[in-house]
Image (cartoon, helix red, strand yellow):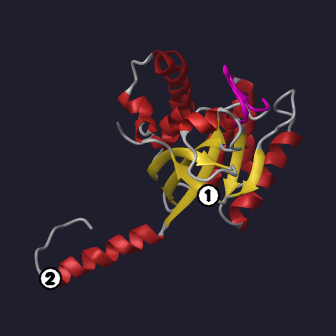
């Protein structure tokens, strides 16, 4: 695993108002600044196994404004968790990430994506199996598509994994936010067995690899 992370790192490295005034004029400036901040945000949508895991990972990155767990890539409108778990809706468990591109780039998000799950296991991550756990990148524009395909090709050419990468790269169509109890799951349920035995070790490993990109706790 350490060897894989090192190779991925080398590839990605090679490519590559404060103050408070109470008059109406300053209030208008604050509104305009807020609108400008919103305009600089971008959205990425990834599937990398259980969304409890991927949500917990991306929430900890500097520049990430919001992370939501949900479903993408399927054909059934307004799917429920129970329906997605049957594997019949075509959806993947996903995290939709809103990020400040002045602080963190899509390229950096892709690096985290590739390093924090196994992109060679078809419809499976660890003990979680089914099409809903597939590795997937749902691109929102041509730039995201080109970057995703470029880095996938670079990683395949480097033969980092013994098996081929099976990550799906598809155009984003619709994201359905998962039920409320799935949101912010790890942060609120850290002592739950799945969190303790599966997510916590993953988070600890992630923190070591991406120490320079973490938000201050």
Q: Please give the residue where the numbered disc 2 appears in the rendered image.
A: 24
Give the x, y percent position of residue 206. Answer: 55, 31
Labels 2 and 1: the sequence-earlier one: 2
Mark 2 touches mark 1? (CB < 8 Å): no
Residue holding disc 1: 174
- Report if residue 136 is visible in the image: yes
The quarter in which the C terminus is drawn is top left
| Snapshot quadrant of residue 94 | top right
Give the Cα distance between marks 2 and 1: 40 Å
Residue 164 located left or right of residue 69: right
Q: Which residues are magenta?
A: 121-131
x then y, percent, for residue 41: 49, 64
Q: Position of residue 89 (x, y in %)?
A: 68, 43
Vertical position of residue 170 compared to residue 34: above or below = above
Residue name at image x 32 percent, y 78 percent: 32
Q: Which residue: 16% across, 68% down?
A: 20
Q: Residues within 10 Å of mark 1 (few under 14, many from 20)?
A: some
| Secondary structure of residue under mark 1 | loop
Image-based side of 181 in relation to 49, left or right: left
Residue 210 in sight from this viewpoint: no
User: Residue shown at 55%/37% (left/top)?
Assistant: 81
User: Mark 2 falls on what kind of element?
Assistant: helix
Where residue 104 sits in the image (x, y, percent)? Answer: 53, 54
Specify few, some or many for label 2: CA neighbours under 10 Å numbering under 14, 14-19, or 20 or more: few
Q: Is residue 73 left or right of residue 56?
A: right
Tell me: 169 left or right of 84. right
Identify which residue, 83 or 149, lies in the foreground.
83
The answer to whether residue 4 is above or below residue 101 is: above
Q: Quadrant of the N terminus?
A: top right
């Amino acid at each position: 695993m350490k060897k894989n992370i090192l190779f991925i790192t080398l590839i990605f490295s090679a490519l590559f108002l404060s103050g408070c005034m109470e008059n109406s004029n300053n209030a208008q400036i604050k509104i305009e600044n807020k609108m400008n901040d919103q305009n600089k945000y971008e959205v990425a949508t990834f599937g990398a196994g259980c969304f409890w895991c991927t949500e917990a990972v991306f929430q900890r990155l500097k520049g990430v404004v919001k992370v939501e767990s949900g479903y993408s890539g399927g054909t059934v409108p307004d799917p429920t968790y129970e329906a997605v778990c049957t594997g019949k809706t075509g959806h993947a468990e996903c995290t939709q990430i809103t990020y400040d591109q002045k602080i963190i780039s899509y390229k950096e998000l892709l690096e985290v994506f590739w390093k924090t799950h196994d992109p060679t296991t078809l419809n499976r991550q660890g003990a979680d199996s089914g099409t809903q756990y597939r590795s997937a990148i749902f691109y929102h524009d041509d730039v995201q598509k080109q970057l995703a395909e470029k880095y996938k090709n670079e990683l395949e050419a480097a033969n980092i994994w013994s098996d081929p990468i099976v990550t799906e790269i598809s155009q984003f169509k619709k994201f359905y936010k998962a039920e409320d109890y799935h949101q912010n799951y790890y942060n609120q349920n850290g002592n739950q067995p799945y969190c303790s035995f599966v997510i916590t070790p993953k988070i600890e490993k992630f923190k070591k690899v991406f120490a320079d990109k973490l938000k201050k706790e």
